[in-house]
Image (cartoon, helix red, strand yellow):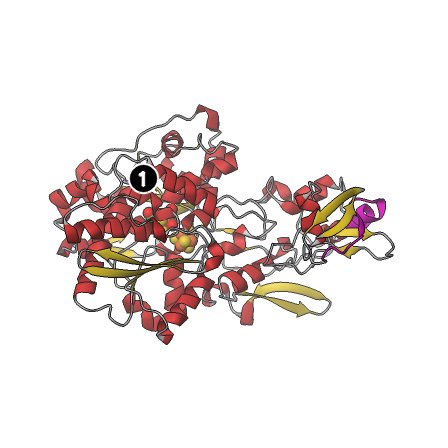
Amino acid sequence: LVHLTIDNKPITVPAGTTILEAAEHNGIPIPKLCYLKDINEIGACRVCVVELEGKDKLIISCNNKVEEGMVIYTNSPKVRMNRRKTVELILSQHDCRCATCVKSGNCTLQKIANDLNILEVPFQQELEQTPWNKDFPLIRDSSKCIKCMRCIQVCDKIQSLNIWDVESTGSRTTVHVSKNRKIEDADCSLCGQCITHCPVGALRERDDTEKVWSALADKKKVTVVQIAPAVRAAWGEALGMKREEATVGKIVDALRKIGFDYVFDTAFSADLTIMEEGAEFLERLQNGELKDRPMFTSCCPGWIRFIKSQYPHLVPQLSSAKSPQQMFGAVMKTYFAKSIGVDPENICTVSIMPCLAKKGERNMELFYEEYAGHDVDIVLTTRELVRMIRSAHIAPSTLVDAPCDTLMQDGSGAGVIFGATGGVMEAALRSAYFLVTGKNPDADAFSVVRSNNLNHGAVCAEIPIGDTVVRAAVVSGLGNARQLIEMIERGDVHYDFVEVMACPGGCVGGGGQPIHDGQELALERGKNLYFLDKNANIRFSHENKDVLKLYEDFMGKPLSHKAHLLLHTDHNA
Ligand code: HC1
Ligand code: SF4
């Protein structure tokens, strides 16, 4: 243990603790911009400086460790003056028009400048303006970048994709797409983790809310919206709602108030996905197709983009099932369109997703008898949903629990846990068990595939189902996925079925979720989905009555010709 004083408070912490952590654990917060625990501890922003008694120069607190007897001041006149100069310099190179910035109100730079009572930017340098493809789902505004390097580090260390890099042009350091590429040519998975780790508004999603407002205003259009599982675990955070208040039923109410004609829950089509993917898995397993390599899940478009660019030879191992988002879109434009007697062309399908990659996935085309457009027309992130609720001036306190529309109303607990890492696997195992043995397992029988630590890489389990043992692996985060694939390719391990989600913790930690600077909330949000599953009326996808009715009245059975046409895709194409 090390003894020191911080702001006259005697403190004892374990050796190896940084000054910043020692202070924070003792209720003395130190402002910081670039620091991200274990990911970015480079002291680039110099905002976290502190004064060490006996030393002339201020020291950086995020990467200097405590030493016995240190006397530290975190807010002395010298520290304040220096910190102020640092922040003024950052502001001088930053586009400070907060009123039109997506991060306003939730921006670390804005908060630090406000806290330091900086009322004027003493000098403004010329702002960096790098051209950007505004049609790409990920938008970067170079004039807002503060060169904290977090995007580079998250992409390298967590996602192993190295999309961003530092570039030096004369005296200026800038961040840019690596290897001089354009973002659209850079193998970006669109996981959006760089956005959720950016302390300012330099990175954001392409805003598609105006497209939705136009569709809502178009009298000819019937607007149909779906809400992804993970959205319910996070949307309230950005509206100041308590966790228990922020129910999915209130999202349904908000979307109706905004003007949508029909509102559905993606948990319905997650169940549908399990019916198709589960049947496909058992077929491939029984045909001996999985002897050398596993079948991989296909519901995460960030992962699909990753495997296509990094391991193209493994693409045939992907399940051919479309994601729940796409399946729902296809069903909305066929089965549902027929039931309400509307031409699919006049239906606008919208989805609310925790995800950026879903904005790319929606480009997938729908063929039904003839070309029928896209399954999904517009994808909004959870953050865009919140912006729409705000634009509509809906007070969260006025929202009530409303049910989804009928025909595709049921959604099981198994469908809800899709939003957390391990959830797709667990849901699939529950139904595979039923398909093989003819009876339900205990609904919690496969909870071993859940994660409680995202730094531990893959979760693996051998699951007996009837006479066979299914070797299952679950992984989230693309760096973890890369490690697992390398092990599979070397032959060190063998699995039959592997679930991969691009974002750490799964969709609950998605790149489109509300941002809390420096906090990782994926596991906590995931627990909420498991709680909802535990308390759900039905916990098995194969017991979803509306899914069963869809098969009976329209789709036939899993893997039928019609199901292939509407619910599956060729990832090789
Ligand atoms: Fe996901 Fe999925 S779980 S991929 O994270 O399979 O985005 O929530 O909607 O499609 O269901 C996302 C979440 C989501 C799909 C489902
Ligand atoms: Fe999107 Fe979920 Fe995949 Fe992240 S894990 S890229 S949020 S589908």
User: Camera-side residue: 71 or 366?
Assistant: 71
Residue 69 included in the magenta stretch of the image = yes
In percent of the image, x 33 and y 38: which residue is there? 534
The amino acid sitting under disc 1 is Asp
Q: Determine whether, in the image, residue 140 is placed left or right of residue 278.
A: right
Is residue 70 at all visible to an observer of this figure? yes
Image position, residue 320 (x, y; %): 25, 60
Is residue 131 at all visible to an observer of this figure? no
- Give the secondary structure at mark 1: strand
Quadrant (top left/top right/bottom left/bottom right) for the C terminus: bottom left
Note whether 565 is above or below 537 in the view shown: below
Total numbered circles: 1
Q: Determine whether, in the image, residue 438 is placed left or right of residue 61.
A: left
Q: Determine whether, in the image, residue 364 is placed left or right of residue 381.
A: left
Note whether 469 is above or below 433 in the view shown: below
Image position, residue 18 (x, y; %): 69, 54
State whether label 1 is within 8 Å of ligand 1: no
Q: Determine whether, in the image, residue 92 is placed left or right of residue 313.
A: right
User: Camera-side residue: 250 or 341?
Assistant: 250
Q: Which residues are magenta?
A: 65-85
In percent of the image, x 28 and y 55: which residue is there? 322
Image position, residue 186 (x, y; %): 48, 67
- Check disc 1 and report the residue beneath it: 265
Circle 1 Cα neighbour tier, 10 Å, few/some/many (<14 / 14–19 / ≥20): many
Image position, residue 551 (x, y; %): 15, 46
User: Camera-side residue: 530 or 8?
Assistant: 8
